[in-house]
Amino acid sequence: MSQTLNVALIGQKFMGRVHSNAYLNAGRFFNLPIQPVMHTIAGLDLISLAPFADRWGWANYSTNWKEIVKDPALDLIDVSTPNYMHAEQAVAALSAGKHVACEKPLAGTLKDARMMRNAAARAKKCRTFVWFNYRRCPAVALAYKLISGGRLGKLYHVRARYLQDWAGPDHPLTWRFQKKYAGTGAHGDLNSHMIDLARFLTGDEISEVSGALGENFISEREVIEPRPKTGGARRGANRRKKPKQGKSDVDDAMMFLCRFSKGAIGSFEASRLASGHANDNSIEISGEHGAIRFSFEEMNRLFFYDHTESRDTAGWREVMCTSAGNHPYAGAWWPDGHVIGYENTFVNMVADMMAIIAGDDPIVPMPDFADAYETQRVLEAASLAAKSRSAVKLTEVK
Ligand SMILES: NC(=O)c1ccc[n+]([C@@H]2O[C@H](COP(=O)([O-])OP(=O)(O)OC[C@H]3O[C@@H](n4cnc5c(N)ncnc54)[C@H](O)[C@@H]3O)[C@@H](O)[C@H]2O)c1
């Protein structure tokens, strides 16, 4: 019988569901050294918490995260709230001696992220994890193994983009469009994933950012009126009145160029208004001996080009990354060719978190707060570069 670890999850909407599914299923697919126990779900909306707990298998529920993070029964606190809450909740949990798994970006601001990195460094017995889940697509993990094993040789190019199209003018003013809650818009939300992937896959650090350009295309959005009795939210409370508008003060799209410390150059693009791209995060890395290409909407495949082959037969290979003996994480899932999806990357991450807490190695490296702080510095450098319209060296961003 393996050890157990009591988990509390703060946040019960999108990531609340995704993480609940991951804790529920990790022990069913992986032989875990430590079994996560779904102890408490915490959120704001009391009315929906009980059915949520019932549906997803949480033993308890609460609207008071401050009590939860101090509860001696709990071992791991999972912070899946809007970005502005990450620092306060994660630091409180670390101060109470808990392991913390926090959603990305690490924080809305570099100042908050620094506070979290420092708190993690002080809490020596606690492990920290950041949900950059795309590292744990088998195809991305395979790319990591190829690149770190030298298969591409010296790296020349990183081309990364994360394009979505859900945020048109009819989309209301949620927390994601307000600087005070989100920090930035598409940049922190989407570029954070791609910066993490680029740093992870290349094993290199970005040393300078230039050519940064952000745009806020839709500066006013409909305000969601609070629902009077439940404290929840309702859109267009009175349809006969002109809906109240509020200011959206974050970028809808953000691009930048960069240099890596070992010589490669990179380009990044994030948008929530790229019509025709629902959740298209793609990365291509070119080196002297070959290249890899990954696109999330075809997440089971890695595209690999072997530049050492003769030109007469050389070409991009589509590798289906579902082979139990050959591909990272694949052995936990289905027979070869029976593809997996978005939610599996989070289950893979819970399995690796449990391994790390048990003192074992994860299948591929896991970002902790110190690592995610480096990603946050790059986000900040790009924001500064966009503002100043000039290049920013990472040494200038502490
Ligand atoms: N890894 C990924 O692929 C991915 C995808 C989407 C979102 N995220 C990240 O996850 C985080 C949450 O995003 P989401 O899409 O789940 O947002 P959401 O708006 O769907 O849910 C946020 C949840 O936080 C709760 N909450 C807010 N303030 C709270 C408080 N003070 N106490 C307790 N609960 C509180 C809300 O009630 C809600 O349940 C963000 O940091 C976001 O960037 C990551």
Image (cartoon, helix red, strand yellow):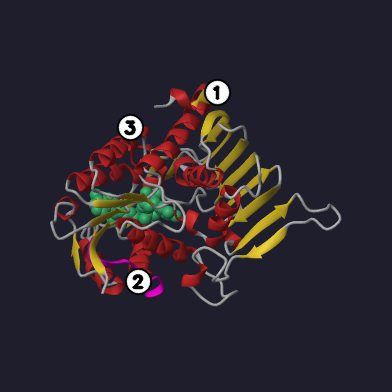
The quarter holding residue 337 reads: bottom right
In the rendered structure, does residue 40 fall within the stretch colored magenta?
yes
Q: Tell me if I can see residue 241 in this picture.
A: no
Alpha carbon of mark 2 to alpha carbon of mark 1: how far? Answer: 49 Å
Give the mark count. 3
Q: Earlier in the sequence, mark 3 or mark 1?
A: 3
Residue 131 image position (x, y, % from top left): 40, 53
Distance, label 3 to label 1, CA atoms, is 22 Å
| Residue extent of the magenta highlight | 27-41
Residue 125 seen from this side: yes
Q: Amino acid at mark 2?
A: Gly
Q: Which structural element holds mark 1? A: loop
Type of the residue with mark 1: Arg
Distance from mark 1 CB to nearest ligand 1 atom below 8 Å:
no
Lower position in the chain sequence, tag 2 or tag 1: 2
- Name the residue rendered at 54%, 28% in the picture: 208
Q: Nearer the viewer, residue 259 or 9?
A: 259
Location of mark 3 (residue) = 111
Numbered mark located on residue 389 in the image: 1
Which residue is found at the position 33% from the left and 66% from the top? 23
Which residue matches tag 2? 27
Q: Measure the C-alpha gap from mark 3 to mark 2.
A: 36 Å
Quarter of the picture containing the N terminus is bottom left
How packed mark 3 is, by other alpha carbons closer than 10 Å (few <14, some 14-19, many 20 or more), is: few
Which quarter of the rendering shows the C terminus?
top left
Mark nearest the camera among 2 and 1 is: 2
Secondary structure, mark 3, is: helix
Q: Are marks 3 and 2 in contact (CB under 8 Å)?
A: no
